[in-house]
């Protein structure tokens, strides 16, 4: 059953209060930090600060193990209002906003049209998952298990072990999962999770506009970025899921936008217009540096793959900041980045014994790492492994690049690389050169990153989905394309560039998944709420045609409609999600086990087994995500989590875990020849403390079982098994 109507209204009011308070805090802090920002750039700064305040508030509560409804409401609202009071007190009374160059009406309409179409494309899979549930492999493997566990334990302190794999996913940055956890706490359900990535997409589109804003090519940079944001690999992996690439991309693009726009100077007198960016020295005032640090910290707090572009840009900005400015640039931007984005790395260092990125020993430092079993979702091949294998290009890389980026993917890649190389070599603006070099470096690192061509030797089945690791560099390069001087001056050439990227976008989006007629109304409302209303109100405010009361009234109407439609979606989600269990792993996997555990509530479930158990484990959390699910394993130093290797050890772990139910496959791996192939079902099936409630002996890839734990298992019973 869905949560009560009262709890839904309470969750909505709490969310409205939190958003309003944090939005107010973001607005006034921005007025203090960068009073010269105006229009779209100011709104981007407002929302970036507001998200940072939200993340910091939740991290504080998680550290204190107080991620509870009341405390989330009190602390986030208090921090938002406190930030607003501080910002209002410190904001300059005579602050002069620097206006952006005016953009032509047709160019503006093209940009809004592309933003609308991109958002619409994302809404269809998002609404589909509101009906069916989130079935993406990474979503059900660790993103949502992390979020649900934070919500259940009210804490971010403890590591949640999801598997015995080499990746040690529990050390990943988890700001995105923290937002999902807050949604679960507020609404007593994860129904909002399939929609959250739509908000990050809106921020990404806004940030892409701001990249070209000081050059009067905001529409073109938005469309160029949308080529990536609306590409096949993004549509297949992000909308309606808890995958976090889009959140990182949003704030990576914002990072670049704040640096590029940081060349604005506070207007010396009323009516003054900003300097042309190329003519400015590469010096940035502290305000833009602070904003850049906030955005960079948010990007780094989401996903490890964003560390490369963030670090490359930050180091480049420091190096080129000019004599006498490097130290100031380093500490202002660096300290802000650390405060906003360092939480998960500090947590990892504490839990691992000194390593902020425990998946790596960090080269010559030889820092401690978890002693994981050499198990991987797929064999760990990088694209570089196949650099000189034309057969792989023909059979795998080229077809999957077509799926990932569209039929003109060669043109997209060539243009992106050419733009980045040209700007890195020829641009007079060192900030642009730094961003271009970071984009190229990100692409280079992608080629040598393990898992980018994961799969059995000669069959890189993971190549398509892991083109996501290339996306940060690609979106930066394409967003810089319209800024290249030969493509934006004179105005006629800028117009031609806009038409070119729009044509590339149009061809690319024709290859993305089909639309669903039944979701057209929902799509219309979401696009209205996230694109048309913000764009219309923003433009109206800039041109003096929309007053604050009108803007407030429009916002209130949209919020009230969202509350009405949201309740219907929450009820429908509770009734229908995860009822079609075949979607977890195709026709395989523990289908009856999923159906059985979906009906359980507030139970502690121990799981163990091969990929069918690992990658679909969120299905065991139950309809309301209240079941606590642990992968049964042996914990070791530095955050190690390994498979039990004997019957006695396995039974002991079950007793220590005090589980209500066990879900397991027959063996821990699918192939009898595998090194870590253990018969976990045989180890416990005869113990009288277990009652078999579900058995799927014929399911593929291997049988699975659900036991109800009715007592303490007897480790001495393993003697008859020879273990």
Image (cartoon, rainbow, N blue to C red):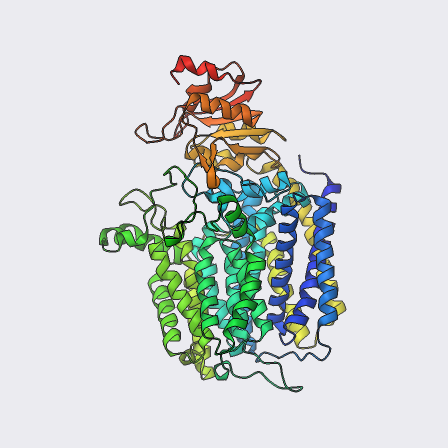
Q: Is residue 652 above or below residue 533?
A: above
When asked about the image quadrant of residue 425, the answer is: bottom left
Q: Is residue 640 left or right of residue 87?
A: left
Q: Is residue 621 visible?
A: yes
Looking at the rendering, in which quadrant would you find the N terminus? top right
- Foreground residue, 327 or 700? 327
Residue 645, horizontal then vertical, whole percent: 40, 27
Q: Look at 41% across and 55% down and name the residue there.
A: 469
- Foreground residue, 473 or 7? 473
Residue 174, horizontal then vertical, whole percent: 54, 49
Q: Is residue 137 above or below residue 635?
A: below
Looking at the rendering, in which quadrant would you find the C terminus? top left
Q: Look at 43% across and 30% down and name the residue there.
A: 609
When asked about the image quadrant of residue 67, the answer is: top right
Q: Look at 58% across and 18% down and name the residue there.
A: 710
Q: Is residue 289 above or below residue 649?
A: below
């Amino acid at each position: 059953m869905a949560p009560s109507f009262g709890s839904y209204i309470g969750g909505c009011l709490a969310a409205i209060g939190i958003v309003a308070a944090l939005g107010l805090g973001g607005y006034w802090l921005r007025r203090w930090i960068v009073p010269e920002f105006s229009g779209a750039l100011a709104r981007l700064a407002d929302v970036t600060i507001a998200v940072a305040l939200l993340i910091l508030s939740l991290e504080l509560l998680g550290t204190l193990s107080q991620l509870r409804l009341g405390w989330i409401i009190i602390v986030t609202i208090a921090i938002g209002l406190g930030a607003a009071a501080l910002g209002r007190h410190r904001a300059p009374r005579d602050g002069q906003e620097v206006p952006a160059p005016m953009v032509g009406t047709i160019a503006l309409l093209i940009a809004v049209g592309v933003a609308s179409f991109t958002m619409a494309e994302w809404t269809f899979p998002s609404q589909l998952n509101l009906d069916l549930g989130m079935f993406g492999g990474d979503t059900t493997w660790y993103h949502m298990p992390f979020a649900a566990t934070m919500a259940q334990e009210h804490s971010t302190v403890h590591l949640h072990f999801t598997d015995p794999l080499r990746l040690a996913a529990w050390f990943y940055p988890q700001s995105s999962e923290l937002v999902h956890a807050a949604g679960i706490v507020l609404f007593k359900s994860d129904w909002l999770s399939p929609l959250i990535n739509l908000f990050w997409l809106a921020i990404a589109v806004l940030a892409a506009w701001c990249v070209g804003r000081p050059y009067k090519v905001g529409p073109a940079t938005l469309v160029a970025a949308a080529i990536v944001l609306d590409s096949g690999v993004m549509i297949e992996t992000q909308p309606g899921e808890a995958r976090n690439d889009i959140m990182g991309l949003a704030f990576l693009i914002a990072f670049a936008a704040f640096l590029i726009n940081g060349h604005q100077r506070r207007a010396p007198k009323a009516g003054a217009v900003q300097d042309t960016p190329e003519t400015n020295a590469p010096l940035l005032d502290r305000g833009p540096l602070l904003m850049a640090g906030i955005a960079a910290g948010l990007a780094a707090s989401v996903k490890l793959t964003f560390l490369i572009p963030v670090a490359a840009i930050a180091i480049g900005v420091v190096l080129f900041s000019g004599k006498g400015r490097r130290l100031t640039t380093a500490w202002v931007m660096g300290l802000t980045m650390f405060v906003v984005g360092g939480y998960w790395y500090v947590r990892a260092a504490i839990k691992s014994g000194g390593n902020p990125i425990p998946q790596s020993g960090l080269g010559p430092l030889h820092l401690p790492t978890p002693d994981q079993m050499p198990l991987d979702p797929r064999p760990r091949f990088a694209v570089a492994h196949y650099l000189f294998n034309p057969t792989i290009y023909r059979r795998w890389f080229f077809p999957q690049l077509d799926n990932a980026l569209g039929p003109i993917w060669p043109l997209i890649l060539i243009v992106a690389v050419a733009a980045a190389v040209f700007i890195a070599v020829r641009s007079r603006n060192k900030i642009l050169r730094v961003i271009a070099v970071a984009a190229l470096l990100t692409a280079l690192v992608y080629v040598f990153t393990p898992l980018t061509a994961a799969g059995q030797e000669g069959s890189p089945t993971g190549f398509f989905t892991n083109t996501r690791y290339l996306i940060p560099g690609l979106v930066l390069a394409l967003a810089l394309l319209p800024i290249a001087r030969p493509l934006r001056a004179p105005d006629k050439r800028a117009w031609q560039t806009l038409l070119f990227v729009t044509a590339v976008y149009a061809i690319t989006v024709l290859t993305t998944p089909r639309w669903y007629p039944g979701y057209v109304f929902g799509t219309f409302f979401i696009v209205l709420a996230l694109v048309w209303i913000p764009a219309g109100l923003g433009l109206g405010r800039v041109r003096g045609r929309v007053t604050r009361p009108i803007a407030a009234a429009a916002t209130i109407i949209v919020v009230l409609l969202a509350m009405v439609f949201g309740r219907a979606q929450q009820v429908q989600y509770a009734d229908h999600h995860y009822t079609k269990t075949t979607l977890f792993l195709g026709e395989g996997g523990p289908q009856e086990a999923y159906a059985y555990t979906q009906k359980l509530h507030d139970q502690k479930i121990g799981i163990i087994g091969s990929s069918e158990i690992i990658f679909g484990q969120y299905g065991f959390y139950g309809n309301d995500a209240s079941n606590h699910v642990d992968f049964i394993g042996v914990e070791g130093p530095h955050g190690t989590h390994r498979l039990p290797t004997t019957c006695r050890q396995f039974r002991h772990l079950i007793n220590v875990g005090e589980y209500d139910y066990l879900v397991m496959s027959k063996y821990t791996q699918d192939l009898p020849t595998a090194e870590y192939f253990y018969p976990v079902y045989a180890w416990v099936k005869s113990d009288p403390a277990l009652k078999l409630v579900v058995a799927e002996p014929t399911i593929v890839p291997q049988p699975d079982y659900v036991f109800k734990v009715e007592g303490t298992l007897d480790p001495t019973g393993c003697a008859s098994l020879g273990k």
